[in-house]
Image: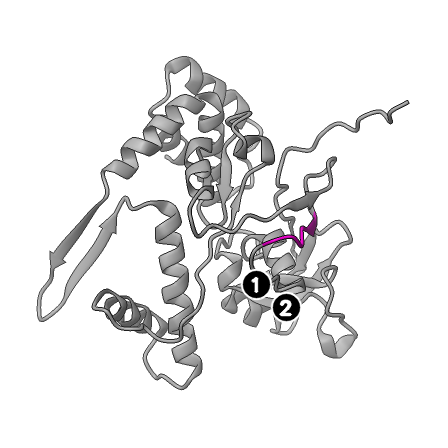
Amino acid sequence: MKVAAATAWLSDDDARAVDTVLEDRLPDRNSDQIRKAANHAAMMADRDGAARRAERNRGGRRLSVRHGETGVASIEVEDGPVEKVAAAYTRIDREARALRAGGETRTLDQLRADVALDLLLGGQGGKSERSEVFLYMDLHTYLGLNDDPAEMAGHGHIPASLAREIASGSNTVLRRIITDPLSGQVLDLGRDRYRPTAGLDEFVRVRDRECRRPGCHRVAQACDLDHSLPWQFGGHTADTELVDLCRRDHRLKDEPGWNYALGSEGTLTITTPTGQRYDSTPPPLHEPRAEEPPPF
């Protein structure tokens, strides 16, 4: 169903090309991973069509109200721009969690709903924090030299034209990210930027993008930074030992019998109490490239 939905707009020839690309990429992936892989393959098959589709979908945004019974109703922004929806949810979630940490007895779901409505009605919503989304695109895509899809953490791939539109926003902060050309993994964040860096914390969040537990896609901005080897057992506060885990998976990690080991190449190996092993590696920022011969 995920593949069919992602490729329904393609021509028959392009759909068959996507089917060939995905043939070896779907085993052992969950439904959300399959959705992202299928969307990326579809965009690569018809980049111009993906750009037109994104523009058309964003043009259909609307606000709807659904009235329920016994004093409740629902309000929804449908087909809103993904970067604004993601940033809005991150802000609402952060402020709800800040209120919860301050002693609120309401559930997180209740707090998120109350914060969102308060903000819509002109209130402050809670503790004020900067909202962020992580958008990954290479320099050539940004400059318009190619139309490779970009990726938004927590959402998946978006067409290059839409990524350039988001990146050109008046409040957008651009960062230079240094990658390993052979693996595509993050090596360092450029320090030349408009706003001050948060250092190690920000590096790990940019590298991981999402919660590192396989199958969890909570964005890194909403996760806890945790030691793969607990501090009390000799862990160090370094990028080689820190990972992003959502609050639920953070708590699960501390339960008896769970073991987390972070390899030097960034692969996190999780061993469950029953001895099953699962690996999690941050996706590369670009496809691994063949090593170029040294210049003469």
Looking at the rendering, which quadrant does residue 72 occupy? bottom left
Kind of element beneath mark 2: strand
Question: How many numbered discs, if any?
Answer: 2
On screen, residue 225 above or below 39: below
On screen, residue 28 above or below 89: above
Mark 1 residue type: Leu
Relative to residue 73, is residue 86 drawn left or right?
right
Was residue 92 drawn as part of the magenta stretch in this picture?
no
Cα–Cα span, label 1 and label 2: 7 Å
Residue at figure coordinates x 87%, y 27% from the top left: 294
Looking at the rendering, which quadrant does residue 165 occupy? top left
Residue 226 marker: 2
Mark 2 residue type: Asp
Q: Which residues are magenta?
A: 187-193
Name the quarter where the C terminus is drawn.
top right
Residue at figure coordinates x 35%, y 75% from the top left: 126
Q: Earlier in the sequence, mark 1 or mark 2?
A: 2
Looking at the rendering, which quadrant does residue 263 occupy? bottom right
Residue furthest to the bottom: 103
Q: Are marks 1 and 2 in contact (CB under 8 Å)?
A: yes
On screen, residue 119 above or below 88: below
Residue 155: x and y in percent read 44, 46
Residue 51: x and y in percent read 38, 28
Relative to residue 248, is residue 116 drawn left or right?
left
Residue at figure coordinates x 69%, y 55% from the top left: 269
Relative to residue 201, is residue 4 drawn left or right?
left
Residue 109: x and y in percent read 32, 69
Residue at figure coordinates x 29%, y 38% from the top left: 58
Residue 227: x and y in percent read 68, 68
On screen, residue 272 above or below 162: below
Q: Which residue matches tag 1?
A: 245
